[in-house]
Image: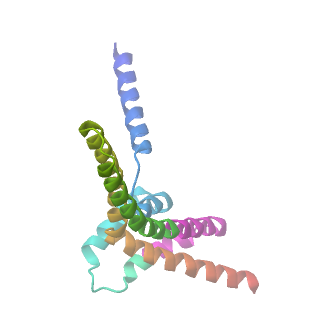
């Protein structure tokens, strides 16, 4: 009887872990930082940025030093990989912004096409609901990437740290 209870808890916890893995994380920067820095360090950095970095603060030395200490002890191959993932994340973030206006335009065209087709009310409402849900997901993705103030501050500092480490290490290899 006791083993069955253990297996139920084990099965439930594995399902919860699988659900966490399957969940789509819409914020590109958060996903990158959690992967590269770890969840605990990421959560600590976000808490620090939210409490100590206002809009008038241009640079934060403590945040820079924390990221530099963590990244400096890593090997060069890992630093290069982290920098490549950062460049990809920045590219995808800009792509989300560019495609949003196109998605809005297509949404409006689809809306008017559905209205102009003279469909039955149930079919028309189903189509409008479907395209509205799709556009709503795109809007959610757009705003989560645009409104992530703490992630943007950390990404900005993270980019500076990685580039500085790469420059120092390439200069050291040339000498």
Name the chief secondary structure element in magenta: helix
Which residue sits furthest right?
175
Identify the residue shown where x is 35% and y is 27%.
9
Magenta highlight on residue 16: no
In which quadrant of the rendered view does residue 77 lie?
A: bottom right
Q: Position of residue 14 (x, y in %)?
A: 42, 33
Q: What stretch is highlighted in magenta?
A: 66-89
Query: Which is more toward the observer, 143 or 11?
Result: 143
Give the quadrant of the N terminus.
top left
Query: Which is more toward the observer, 174 or 142?
Result: 142
Q: Where is residue 173 in the image (x, y as percent from the top left)?
A: 73, 80
Give the quadrant of the C terminus.
bottom right
Left or right, residue 46 beside residue 95:
left
In which quadrant of the rendered view does residue 93 lie?
A: bottom left
Q: Position of residue 43 (x, y in %)?
A: 35, 61
Left or right, residue 164 beside residue 124:
right
In which quadrant of the rendered view does residue 147 lie?
A: bottom left
Query: Which is more toward the observer, 43 or 156?
Result: 156
> How many marks do you count on the picture?
0
Identify the residue shown where x is 63% and y is 69%.
80
In the rendered image of this protein, does residue 4 appear above or below residue 83?
Answer: above
Identify the residue shown where x is 38% and y is 64%.
105
Magenta highlight on residue 73: yes
Identify the residue shown where x is 40% and y is 27%.
11
Color encoding of the figure: rainbow
């Amino acid at each position: 009887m006791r083993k069955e209870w253990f297996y139920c808890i084990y099965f439930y916890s594995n399902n919860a872990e699988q659900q966490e893995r399957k969940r789509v994380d819409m914020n590109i920067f958060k996903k990158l930082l959690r992967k590269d820095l770890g969840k605990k360090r990421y959560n600590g950095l976000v808490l620090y940025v939210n409490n100590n970095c206002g809009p008038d603060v241009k640079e934060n030395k403590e945040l820079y030093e924390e990221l530099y200490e963590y990244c400096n002890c890593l090997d060069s191959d890992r630093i290069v990989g982290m920098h490549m993932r950062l460049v990809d994340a920045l590219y995808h973030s800009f792509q989300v912004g560019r495609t949003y206006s196109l998605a809005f335009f297509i949404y409006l065209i689809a809306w008017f096409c559905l209205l102009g087709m003279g469909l039955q009310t149930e079919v028309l409402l189903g189509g409008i609901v479907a395209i509205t849900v799709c556009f709503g997901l795109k809007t959610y993705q757009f705003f989560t990437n645009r409104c992530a103030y703490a992630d943007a501050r950390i990404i900005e500092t993270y980019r500076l740290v990685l580039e500085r480490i790469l420059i120092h290490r390439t200069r050291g290899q040339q000498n």
